[in-house]
Image (cartoon, rainbow, N blue to C red):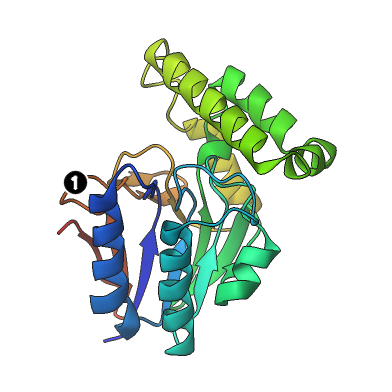
Amino acid sequence: MKTTYFIADLHLSENHPELTTLFVDFMRQRAPNADALYILGDLFDFWIGDDEQSPLIELVKNHIRTLVQHGVPCYFIHGNRDFLLGKYFAQSCGLTLLPEYQVIDLYGKKTLICHGDTLCIDDQKYQQFRRKVHQPWRQWLFRHLPLAWRLRIAQKIRARSQRDKQGKSAAIMDVNPAFTAACMAQFGVHQLIHGHTHRQARHQTNAGQRIVLGDWRINRPSILAVHDNGQMDFINQ
């Protein structure tokens, strides 16, 4: 039976080595038998530029490179934490970068995939911030700052984001149903797979099926396995 895997929101960092262990176990044990692997954003907790170097980054690169060399294509859609991950990183390990919305043929089922943050339009403060940081000139300026400066800026942004979340309702931080349905209609699909909200679930709506990937936690990854016979399973251990 052929299988394609989808993961998102691992938030890998040196502060949580247990998550790195889960990622390594997945890449060694399950991923080599896949048709393809799709990483739908926030692989890293934050990303300040492809020139950053660390043992964690090299470890992730090595496992992606090994998987691709094994014959399993690996695709990536940027998340809100690692939207600056660029071509240099991708080329160094064989990762294929995709646009923020991508339609794929998933064993005969036309499926839209994305990170999911663009669907949360009720969180207006975040959407304003997203529009700013995705401006090419701002990204160019940021990438040309000294690495230490970028690290401090990223840490401040992350801390502010955590504070802002405490004052937001769960509904505001979730996808907007009407906008999501319109997005699915625009791309002509009846199946959507995304992450970002950390709310692992399968939703049946008038627009079709919406599958939400969960985040990775201690001893509990969130892996979606889609099989060529139409079966779909979440793997959480």
Number of numbered discs overlaid on the protein picture: 1
Q: Nearer the viewer, residue 131 or 184?
A: 131
- Give the residue at the far right of this rendering: 137
**Looking at numbered disc 1 in the image, what kind of residue is underneath it?**
Ile
Instruction: Give the left or right position of residue 8, taking residue 88 as reference.
Output: left
Residue 89, can we see it?
yes
Horizontal side of 2 relative to 134 (left or right) equals: left
**Residue drawn where x is 39% and y is 46% of the image:** 11
Horizontal arrangement in the rendering, residue 217 relative to residue 183 (left or right): left
Q: Is residue 49 above or below residue 96?
A: above
Identify the residue shown where x is 58% and y is 36%: 151
Q: Quadrant of the N terminus?
A: bottom left
Q: Residue furthest top?
A: 167
Residue highlighted by disc 1: 218
Under tag 1, what secondary structure? Answer: loop
Mark 1 surroundings: few (<14), some (14-19) or many (≥20) residues within 10 A: few
Across and down, in percent, residue 82 comes to: 55, 47
* Camera-side residue of 80 and 226: 80
Q: Nearer the viewer, residue 31 or 114?
A: 31
How far from the left and from the top, in percent, is residue 71?
45, 89
Residue 73 position, x and y percent, is: 50, 80
Quarter holding residue 91: bottom right
Q: What quarter of the picture does the C terminus occupy?
A: bottom left
The residue lying at 44 percent from left, 53 percent from top is: 43
Is residue 92 placed above or below 233 in the rendered structure? below
The answer to whether residue 30 is visible is: no
Image quadrant assignment for residue 133: top right
* Residue at 60%, 18% in the rendered image: 125
